[in-house]
């Protein structure tokens, strides 16, 4: 790996109309063995640009705070090793670091995630019996445990074209929240009727299962195959399966 590497970092904040305004600024940084991208940002802050804004917390891939776009790909900066970045960066070209482009800009590499937290409030918790003698089977536990590993980095939302390109924030919950909805819908104690809400209010139909969200998930959640597709199957069964429709009309199923 080169002794010094040039990084082209976005610097800016919203203008008077709230639109992102700024420029890409080059910084040449001395490399040490074992550095990750977040180390580079900290070195730039310490040595060249103390006012560079960056959100981070644990530096261990657990808090999901340091999400950004490195060489155009949504990643956690603390889990992105510089030796890997240098292998993918064309010789003589700078490493680019930008904020997540799907969300409103706050400043530099920091974005406003208010929408995500408001969406989270719309998720109805598990609704089930208050008192009962229940033991989880291992198969039931395994089915929803994967969804619990989400660190809410929002990288899956950043890469989702429905939000990033089409800005369907008012109509579409996005992959992170379909993961949560899947965990609730598949919970063995839950009796909430979630499928109409998932179909109409959360806009599941907008997803065309490109698997881009799965590809960027740092927690390794198989978002598409294990969360989104099963939810789509339940919507199809509820609304478009002829046998299920006849069964409901005959009053054989509520």
Image (spheres, helix red, strand yellow):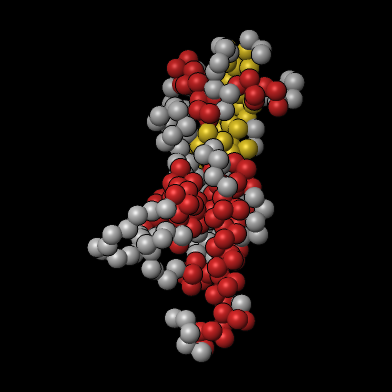
* Residue lying at 63% horizontally and 17% vertically, measured from the top left: 5
Is 104 situated above or below 253?
above
Q: Is residue 4 left or right of residue 78?
A: right
Which residue is rendered at x = 43% and y = 34% of the image?
A: 62
Instruction: Identify the residue at horizontal 28%, vertical 59% (top origin).
Output: 133
Where residue 119 sits in the image (x, y, percent)? 42, 57
Q: Is residue 102 above or below residue 249?
A: above
The C terminus: image quadrant = bottom left
Seen from the viewer's position, the closer of residues 11 and 55 is 55
Q: Nearer the viewer, residue 12 or 113?
A: 113
Residue 168 x/y as whole percent: 55, 60
Q: Position of residue 49 (x, y in %)?
A: 48, 22
Q: Is residue 138 above or below residue 91?
A: below
Q: Is residue 184 visible?
A: no
Residue at point 44% right, 27% down?
A: 59
Left or right: 217, with 132 as reference point: right
């Amino acid at each position: 790996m080169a002794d010094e590497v040039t990084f082209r970092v976005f610097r800016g904040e919203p203008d008077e109309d709230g639109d992102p305004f700024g420029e890409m600024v080059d910084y040449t940084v001395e490399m040490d063995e074992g550095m990750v991208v977040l180390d580079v940002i900290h070195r730039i802050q310490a040595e060249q640009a103390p006012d560079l804004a960056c959100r981070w917390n644990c530096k261990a891939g657990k808090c999901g705070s340091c999400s950004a776009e490195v060489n155009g790909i949504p990643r956690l900066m603390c889990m992105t090793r510089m030796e890997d970045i240098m292998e993918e960066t064309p010789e003589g070209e700078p490493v680019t670091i930008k904020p997540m482009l799907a969300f409103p800009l706050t400043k530099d590499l920091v974005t406003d995630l208010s929408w995500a937290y408001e969406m989270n409030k719309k998720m109805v918790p598990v609704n089930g019996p208050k008192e009962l003698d229940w033991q989880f089977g291992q198969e039931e536990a395994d089915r929803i445990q994967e969804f619990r590993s989400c660190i809410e980095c929002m990288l899956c939302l950043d890469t989702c074209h429905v939000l990033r390109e089409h800005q369907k924030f008012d109509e579409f919950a996005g992959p992170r929240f379909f993961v949560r909805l899947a965990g609730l819908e598949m919970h063995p104690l839950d009796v909430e009727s979630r499928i109409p809400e998932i179909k109409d209010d959360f806009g599941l139909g907008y997803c065309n299962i490109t698997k881009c969200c799965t590809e960027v998930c740092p927690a390794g959640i198989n978002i598409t195959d294990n969360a989104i597709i099963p939810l789509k199957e339940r919507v199809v069964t509820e609304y478009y399966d002829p046998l299920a429709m006849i069964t409901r009309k005959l009053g054989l199923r509520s």
